[in-house]
Amino acid sequence: MPLLRIREAGATTVDEDWASDMTCVVFTVPDKRLAAMDVATGPCVPLVNRKTSVVSVHQQEGFERPDQTAALFDVLGGPAENPLVLIEHRGRGWLYRCSDAFMHAMADANELLVRLAEEDKARGDRELTAFQAKSADLDAAWMQKANWHPQMRSARNRLLRIGKAKVARDKAQSLYIWYGPRVPEYVIIAGSGPYPGKHRRSPT
């Protein structure tokens, strides 16, 4: 695993082995809610004696390094500044706040995509051609800029974070990104039909 070099304004350079079992979570909450999480384990894990976590475990986005996150700022035309501000590092967890410029750049991009989709719909374009084209452009540019792992084929699902940036801006909240060990996700599937395994067929 290549070394990750993180440089924060006013801080020393830190080198870390960025393990493949790490994940990232992009979220926005009121600042006081941060007291309800342990940076070492992340916002998807409840504190002791608490039943709920700060955000759902299903908000984990998978392996991503801060430099890959920051590459999106370059794609969105951000200035030459560090878009991530380190809030706290504890154990294997890192909590960052997106800079105001980064958050606004993502929120602006979200507004652009919404406007393109609305214009497509107004023209009767059910394929949302302009919206899809712009989304594809952002995806391709981020894929090229961020040096993702070879198995990564698209970052389009991760672009959903620009909507979170819009929510954060509208609520006058910060946009946070936590990096740390991923948490197992369990999905409950409901339905009807036979249970898996061997079944005895009814006589006909």
Image: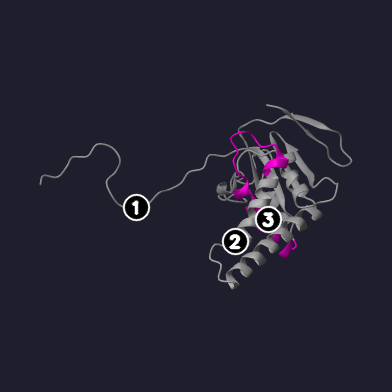
Q: What secondary structure is found at the residue carrying circle 2?
A: helix
Calculate the distance from the C-alpha at mark 2 to the C-alpha at mark 3: 20 Å
User: What are the residue bounds of the magenta stretch?
Assistant: 143-172
Kindly give the residue lying farthest to the left in the view shown.
Answer: 204
Q: Quadrant of the N terminus?
A: top right
Kindly give the residue lying farthest to the right in the view shown.
Answer: 10
> What is the three-letter code of the residue carrying label 2?
Thr
Question: What x and y, as percent, mark residue 113?
Answer: 66, 61
Task: Give the residue at x 29% y 43%.
Answer: 195
In depth, the one of 69 and 128 nearer the eye is 128
Q: Which residue is mark 3?
A: 162
Q: Could you tell me if residue 29 is visible in this image?
A: no
Q: Residues within 10 Å of mark 2 (few under 14, many from 20)?
A: some
Question: What x and y, as percent, mark residue 139?
Answer: 65, 48
Q: Could you tell me if residue 80 is visible in this image?
A: yes
Q: What secondary structure is found at the residue carrying circle 3?
A: helix
Question: What x and y, as percent, mark residue 118?
Answer: 62, 69
> Is the residue 118 above or below the residue 44 in the image?
below
Calculate the distance from the C-alpha at mark 2 to the C-alpha at mark 1: 36 Å
Q: Between label 2 and label 3, give the one nearer the viewer.
A: 2
**In the image, which disc is placed on residue 191?**
1
Q: Which residue is mark 2?
A: 129
Task: Give the residue at x 67% y 67%.
Answer: 115
